[in-house]
Image: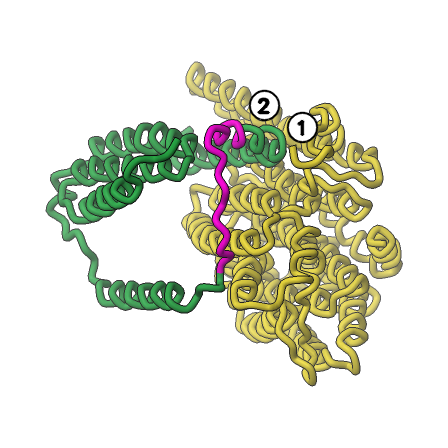
Chain colours: A yellow, B green
């Protein structure tokens, strides 16, 4: 009714949304396989109570089939993304296809693939079918977030992702900590998304549109007014929650520590990457005209000082609190807060350089963190815990994993030949160039200080792995339990981090090219 | 069609809504509260009708006053009411509550007095007959994609609720 573009055929929609459709179908298939597997085990358990090994065997087989179907679905979806047209837009921006969105859909799918790998090895999950289904539906949420330039669709994507992640965090019903993680994540998440929805409604009320491009056109004409500021701040709150930036990070330590490990890895990786993509699109495209300035000599109102404040707080709080942690997952959570701060630098700097630096760093960080959580999963299944002391002597027990963990930790700290270094380098140089006359120097200085501090706590983990002897009180169990797939996935992720460190251009140049 | 006695019906329906809303939180018997809530929701539906929004009014009656309230009543009848009635109904945070209510009230008055230019003043022109058709056009054509994705959201919610809530499945 409004535009000729909206009278399109359903077939065309199906064609352009094919990757999402494939992931949804594979989610339903996985659910069905999980259901039939359960019924068979239930029948076997009832009819012949004697051989429980057989029931366990069928359950394991069902898990395998579920994982296989999920992985297959993700693989086909990647192929479908590759076959999409270069540029297309549907429903006035609800589904946008550009090289950039296609690239990040693939990245999200790859992260989902590795999460499925981790989930297959997680023995404590009692309902693998449902778990994998929810991972896949969360992946659909990620893809929608990445591929939309319309606030309504973005909000629905956020909710789809959020709801899936709440369930994933609380999935392990045998563990109190998992319930705590789920509840905290849910309470914080639902409150912050309420704020975001209110902010979006204020902005819609002012601009009369939910499309980002249309909002930007309206904002050029509209003067800065309190209603706009309220709308922008409230909209940003939901995203600050999703990326765990500092005043909104309180859920992160408990969620990272208590949630099942694949869930924690997914929360830390896929959710973050997609949130940064969509946050960048909202502030740079939608709110572009009210950029403001956060240079120390020329502060001006806009969203950029807000993000700069969030970044500074995150870097300080994240790094300083991480120093005091004894649990590796909590340590990773606080370091995640700090990394959210670094990543925001690129958005504060703005422009193509800044945005691409942010996206590169978010991607590298996500890959690194999935790998680190993979190592944590192995250590946890071997020693029954994930404190720093559980890692002691890992180098002797599993040299490959120890080496991978060293790569991940050094990459997070930003040591030169690894991907994390180039990510930080791009971010800091983009921030230095932006904001005229080194205006963002204060933020870059703070980030450098934070990086030095962070080296200390990453090295504590590595010291436990390579130097400390395992305490006699906790003898390592047989390490047959960690299976081959998990180790291979971790090694592959470490390989990616190394490769991106040696040749960062294969991703960075691609992101830059996709943006032009 | 020109509406009759708009002002009278507006204040009448508002009064019904507010009074039954107060009854919801002051009745000790949860069944009475639930019944009062139904009256409040019906009053709201009447207000929607006065705004020429028959679809929203119908949904309000069918979904909220009908479906959800029946569920509420079922739940109330399943839990142990005798014990719930004896329990103290208000928690001890009434000071915090009063402060928050006052702050909100002051904000409301301030916005009402000073915020004349804050919101656009134009009055929406409402087509009289095509309201429901308009919603259908928006829902199934312009916003079809979002509508379909919302169904995925419900799927996640169902799976999550079953996995979380069932003791053993």
Q: The N terminus of chain A appears in which quarter of the rendering?
A: top right
Q: Residue at x 43, y 48 (%)?
A: A179
Instruction: Kindly identify which chain the residue marked by label 1 belongs to.
Output: A
Tag 2 or tag 1, which sits nearer the N-term?
2
Q: Is residue A511 left or right of residue B12?
A: right
Image quarter for residue A287? bottom right
How far is the residue under mark 1 from the one under mark 2?
9 Å
Q: Relative to residue A265, is residue A342 depicted above or below?
A: below
Relative to A134, does residue A220 appear above or below in the rendering? below
Query: Could you say where residue A10 lies in the image, as x and y percent from the top left?
Result: 69, 24
Whole-percent x, y for residue A491 in the image: 76, 49
Tag 1 residue: A69
**Mark number for residue A434?**
none
Mark count? 2
Give the letter of the chain under mark 2.
A
- Of the pair A358 and B113, the residue shown nearer to us: B113
Dots 1 and 2 on the same chain:
yes
Res. A402 visible in picture:
no
Q: Which residues are magenta?
A: B119-135
Q: Position of residue B156 (x, y in %)?
A: 52, 35
Q: Residue furthest top?
A: A47
Q: Which residue is mark 2?
A: A33
Q: Is residue A394 visible?
A: yes
Does the magenta portion include B126? yes
A218 on left or right of A46: right
Most foreground residue, A73 or A61: A73
Is disc 2 placed on a helix, strand or loop? helix
Residue reaching furthest to the front: B2
Q: Residues within 10 Å of mark 1 (few under 14, many from 20)?
A: some
């Amino acid at each position: 009714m409004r535009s000729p573009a909206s009278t399109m055929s359903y077939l065309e929609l199906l064609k352009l949304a094919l990757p999402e459709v494939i992931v949804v179908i594979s989610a339903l298939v996985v659910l069905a396989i999980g259901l039939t597997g359960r019924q068979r085990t239930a029948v076997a358990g009832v009819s012949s109570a004697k051989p429980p090994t057989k029931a366990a065997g069928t359950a394991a087989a069902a898990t395998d089939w579920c994982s296989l179907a999920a992985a297959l679905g993700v693989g086909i979806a990647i192929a479908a993304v590759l076959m999409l047209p270069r540029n297309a837009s549907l429903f006035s921006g609800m589904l946008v296809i550009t090289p950039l969105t296609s690239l990040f859909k693939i990245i999200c799918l790859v992260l989902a693939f590795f999460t499925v790998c981790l989930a297959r090895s997680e023995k404590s999950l009692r309902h693998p079918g449902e778990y994998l289904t929810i991972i896949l539906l969360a992946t659909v949420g990620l893809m929608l977030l990445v591929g939309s330039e319309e606030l309504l669709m973005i909000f629905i994507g956020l909710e789809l992702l959020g709801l899936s992640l709440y369930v994933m965090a609380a999935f392990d019903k045998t563990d109190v900590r998992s319930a705590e993680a789920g509840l905290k994540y849910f309470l914080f998440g639902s409150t912050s998304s309420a704020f975001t929805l209110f902010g979006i409604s204020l902005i819609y009320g002012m601009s009369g549109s939910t499309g980002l491009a249309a909002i930007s056109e309206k904002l050029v004409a509209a003067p800065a007014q309190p209603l706009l500021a309220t709308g922008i701040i409230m909209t940003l709150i939901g995203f600050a929650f999703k990326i765990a930036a500092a005043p909104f990070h309180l859920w992160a330590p408990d969620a990272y520590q208590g949630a099942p490990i694949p869930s924690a890895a997914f929360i830390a990786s896929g959710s973050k990457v997609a949130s940064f993509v969509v946050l960048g699109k909202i502030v740079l495209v939608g709110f572009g005209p009210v950029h403001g300035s956060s240079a120390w000599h020329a502060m001006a109102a806009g969203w950029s000082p807000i993000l700069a404040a969030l970044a500074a707080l995150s870097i300080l709080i994240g790094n300083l609190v991480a120093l005091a942690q004894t649990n590796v997952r909590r340590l990773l959570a606080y370091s995640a807060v700090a990394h959210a701060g670094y990543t925001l630098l690129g958005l504060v700097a703005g422009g193509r350089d800044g945005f691409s630096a942010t996206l590169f760093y978010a991607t590298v960080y996500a890959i690194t963190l999935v790998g680190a959580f993979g190592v944590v999963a192995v250590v946890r299944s071997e020693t029954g815990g994930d404190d720093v002391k559980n890692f002691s002597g890992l180098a002797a027990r599993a040299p490959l994993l120890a080496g991978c963990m060293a790569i991940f930790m050094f990459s997070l700290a930003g040591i030169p030949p690894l991907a994390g270094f180039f990510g930080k380098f791009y971010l800091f140089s983009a921030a230095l160039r932006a904001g005229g006359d080194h205006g963002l120097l204060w933020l870059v200085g703070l980030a450098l200080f934070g990086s030095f501090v962070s080296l200390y706590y990453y090295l504590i983990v590595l010291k436990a792995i390579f130097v400390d002897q395992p305490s006699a009180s906790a003898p390592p169990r047989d390490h047959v339990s960690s299976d081959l797939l998990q180790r291979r996935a971790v090694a592959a992720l470490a390989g990616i981090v190394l490769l991106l460190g040696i040749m960062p251009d294969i991703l960075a140049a691609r992101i830059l090219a996709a943006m032009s | 069609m020109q509406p009759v006695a708009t002002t009278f019906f507006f204040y009448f329906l508002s009064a019904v809504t507010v009074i039954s809303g107060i009854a919801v939180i002051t009745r000790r018997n949860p069944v009475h509260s639930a019944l009062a809530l139904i009256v409040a929701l019906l009053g709201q539906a009447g207000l929607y009708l006065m705004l020429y929004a028959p679809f929203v009014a119908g949904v309000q009656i069918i979904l909220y006053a009908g479906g959800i309230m029946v569920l509420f009543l079922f739940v109330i009848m399943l839990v142990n009411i005798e014990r719930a009635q004896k329990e103290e109904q208000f928690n001890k945070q009434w000071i915090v509550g009063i402060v928050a209510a006052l702050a909100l009230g002051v904000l409301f008055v301030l916005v009402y007095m000073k915020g004349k230019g804050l919101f656009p003043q134009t009055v929406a022109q409402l087509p009289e007959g095509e309201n429901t058709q308009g919603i259908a056009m928006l829902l199934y054509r312009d916003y079809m994609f979002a509508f379909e994705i919302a169904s995925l959201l419900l799927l996640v919610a169902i799976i999550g609720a079953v996995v979380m809530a069932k003791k053993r499945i």
